[in-house]
Image (spheres, coloured by chain):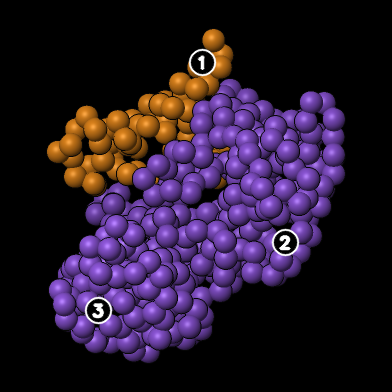
Amino acid sequence: MKSLALFSSIALALSAATAAQAAEKKLTRDQMVHKDKADLQRIDEWIYNDLEQARAEARRTGKPLMAVFRCIP
Amino acid sequence: MDQFVSVRMIQMNGIDLETFQFDYDMTFAVFFMNADKTIYGRYGSRSDMKEAQREISLESLAAALEGALEIHKGYPGNKASVARKQGVKQRYKAPEDYPLLQSKYTSSLDYNGQVAKSCIHCHQVREAQRRIHRDRKQPIPDQLLHPYPMPDVIGLTMDPTKRASVLRVAPGSIAAKAGFNSGDSIDSIDGQKIISVGDIQWALEQTGNNSARQTWTVSNDGASRTLTVSLLAGWRRASPFIWRVTSWDMRRMGFGGMKLDDMTDAERRQRGLNNTQLALEAKHVGQYGEHAVAKRAGVRKGDIIIAFDGVTRRATEEQALAHAMRKRMKGDMLPITVLRGRQKLDFKIRMQ
């Protein structure tokens, strides 16, 4: 169950931009960027585009960081 | 996932290039690291333009996550085992510092304006690096032409569903001579713990293009072996680059914005061309701005290049671009001869 949640979380975050593009083809690129930000900021497990916030959280919790570089298609 | 702090980065603006060094032609790259910026490992590999996900999988990503957790549990006592995974010194600390990018971008996205246009894409870093050499009229070095070689370059086809496991060993290859077997798991390279194929690529990337020897430890069926990989000078040139998105910039610089295809044997027969001569068909000729240099020189889509710069033997587009990037500098005029119908026409393409 835990591994399913892991896969789902990663897949969800990585495909957020692709799914948005597929579902709403009329969005401009600027709108896609804003929507991507709004969509991912609703997911508690991910920090959006802020490495320093992520490092601070890693220091606070003692956890390692996973930084995913994934542009919006 | 709850054992990591996860952050998604969507642009390269403001990114510390001394920490985050990776294959900039990828659209998906992962760093596992400590809060102190020590890199535990990398994940993400690509070798095809269309099949971008051929080399990756959720299974191998999960395996890399496990590997990163193993390292984290032993950190900082095991710091030596990741010492060579850290980025190397850079002249330009952030992408927007590069001459090509500094007048157009800042260190952050413009969310109040044209946010998409304000974004520096990963591949733009690679283009900016190559442009340094091009603007100085220097050959583009092999490390920038053939970055982050896949293990295939030494004869190892890796299993995309496992952490770093060999699927096949090419007969007669560097890996075959070193003694690799199918099923080998790569545990370390020169003392550095390997948690992904991306880590193998990093280890190869740091080796430059000269002859070198690397010590790889592998395990198979519970038994461990130490193998020596002997790289010969120029080894990196076997790593294909034509699939990379940054090849488009090289098409602009070297062939005036044309996309070329080496004609098949059947196509050659139809046109009365033999199998050993040069026959690169212009499948696309750029129409605007700097991508229209070939068009303005007189080249048309469908023209077949049968000679360039004294080269008349069969060559792929990649070989032709490599020639232009190594031997012809910005401002030079590259002579080409094309076949258009039954006519032979000569043109000169200005190198950019």
Residue furthest to the bottom: B332
Judging by the rendered image, the residue that carries numbered circle 2 is B231
Judging by the rendered image, the residue that carries numbered circle 3 is B338
Residue B130 visible to the viewer: yes
Q: Chain of mark 2?
A: B
Instruction: Give the image location of residue B245, x and y in percent.
Output: 38, 57
Q: Are marks 1 and 3 in contact (CB under 8 Å)?
A: no
- Amino acid bearing label 1: Leu
Quarter holding the N terminus of chain B?
Answer: top right
- Amino acid bearing label 3: Val
Instruction: Give the image location of residue A47, x and y in percent.
Output: 48, 35
Judging by the rendered image, the residue that carries numbered circle 1 is A4
**Shown colour of chain B:** purple
**Shown colour of chain A:** orange
- Amino acid bearing label 2: Leu
Quarter holding the C terminus of chain B?
Answer: bottom left
Label 3 Cα crowd, 10 Å radius (few <14 / some 14-19 / many 20+): many
Q: Would residue B304 be found to the left or right of residue B179 on screen? A: left
Which callout, 1 or 2, points to the residue nearer the camera?
2
**Within the image, what quadrant is residue B2 found in?**
top right
Q: Would residue B229 be found to the left or right of residue B279 on screen? A: right
Q: Nearer the viewer, residue B157 or B275?
A: B275
